[in-house]
Image (cartoon, rainbow, N blue to C red):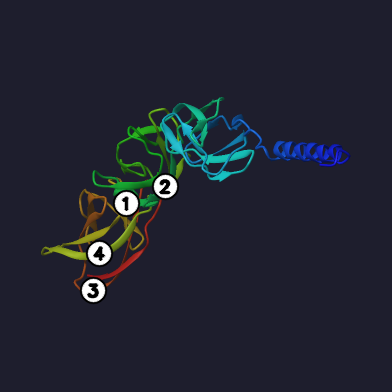
Amino acid sequence: MNEASLPFQMHCIWKSLVMAVVLLIFSWPEPAAALEILSLSPTDAQPGENVLLTGGPFLAGATVRLGTETVLPSRIGERELTFTVPPLPQGDYVLAVVQDQVRADRTFILRVAERPPIIFSLDPPVLDECSGSDSAQIVVDGENFPPGANLFLDGQPAPGRRESSSRLILFLPRLSGGSHQLQVVTPRELKSQPRAFYIDDRPEILSAVPGEDRVNSYDVIIHGNNFHFQTSLVVDGKTVPRSGPLPAHTGRFRYQDCRTLIYERYPYSRTPRPITLQVVNPNARGSNVFTISLP
């Protein structure tokens, strides 16, 4: 080896070693950033609501732990993660993020609140006043009707039955005509928005047919809706008495039930002719005028 070339060779070797070290330094993998949670919004939520976490870095496959429940995020970004609160009972839950089998050091408390009940529909929304009986019902459809949920009618507890978390049955009491408000109240006293239904108290004549026939009188059976015990019967524009002595060529009537009246007619002739019938309730609401051909 030429002694003059030795320094040059040593310089080349030294330069190669320096470059190798530099390349090794730049190619060495950076340590992974520690997973952390910086904020939680909101801190109080109801099942079905979205919750946003900030922090990270969040990776694909990250999951949220709520107590013992594992929740899959609906959206994952490097610094933000969104998930939907599952249907959990009301309470406080420790929240953490887990990814690659590593749990974030910092945890938060998420308070899960009970969702208030919601009424979607009432079936039927309109009823006759005469419908109020032991068999009359209104089907209440909605959501968030937990065990122990009660129905309130015009602000007062009402009889009913829970069929599921989305359906209640109201046993309709006898009610006055007009609009009425129905609410669902949970055992924790969360209330739905009031939902209205209507009681139609207008009397209605649907049919009139001859009944028992006697020598000098016969019955006319009047069928309809919303007849009261104090109802008045008007025949050809004149009010018919309920009882008492019968002057010639008159009649009287009696109340049988809210759908039936019996008109006892004393005709002056057996020749049929058109007559008009109308029912008027104590509140002065009158029925349709019904025309029938009778003696």
Q: Nearer the viewer, residue 282 or 111?
A: 111
Q: Position of residue 24 (x, y in %)?
A: 70, 38
Q: Earlier in the sequence, mark 3 or mark 1?
A: 1
Which residue is tagged 3? Answer: 272
Q: Name the spot of residue 96 as percent of width and height, x first.
A: 51, 30
Residue 26: percent from the left, percent from the top? 72, 39
Regarding residue 76, the answer to whether it shows in the image is yes
Q: Quadrant of the C terminus?
A: bottom left
Query: Which comes sooner in the sequence, label 4 or label 1?
Result: 4
SS assignment at label 4: strand
The residue under label 2 is which amino acid type? Phe
Q: Is residue 162 left or right of residue 116?
A: left
The tag on residue 226 is 1
Which quarter of the figure has residue 13?
Answer: top right
Horizontally, residue 69 falls left or right of residue 262, namely right
Judged left or right of residue 42, residue 13 is right
Q: Nearer the viewer, mark 4 or mark 1?
A: 1
The dot on residue 208 is 4
Disc 4, disc 1: CB below 8 Å? no
**Mark 3 Cα-neighbour bin, 10 Å: few <14, some 14–19, many ≥20:** few
Q: Amino acid at mark 1?
A: Asn
Find out whether the residues at labels 4 and 3 contact each other: C-beta distance under 8 Å: no
- Residue drawn at x 57%, y 45% as measured from the top left: 75
Disc number for residue 197 = 2
Query: Sequence order check: which comes first, mark 2 or mark 4?
Result: 2
Between 42 and 58, which is closer to the camera in this rendering?
Answer: 58
> Which element type, helix, strand or loop, lies under badge 2?
strand
For the point 24% across and 50% down, which residue is it?
A: 242
Please name the residue shown 23% across and 50% down the image.
257
Tag 1 near tag 2, CB within 8 Å: no
Looking at the rendered image, the disc whose residue lies closer to the viewer, 2 or 4, is 2
Q: Amino acid at mark 4?
A: Ala
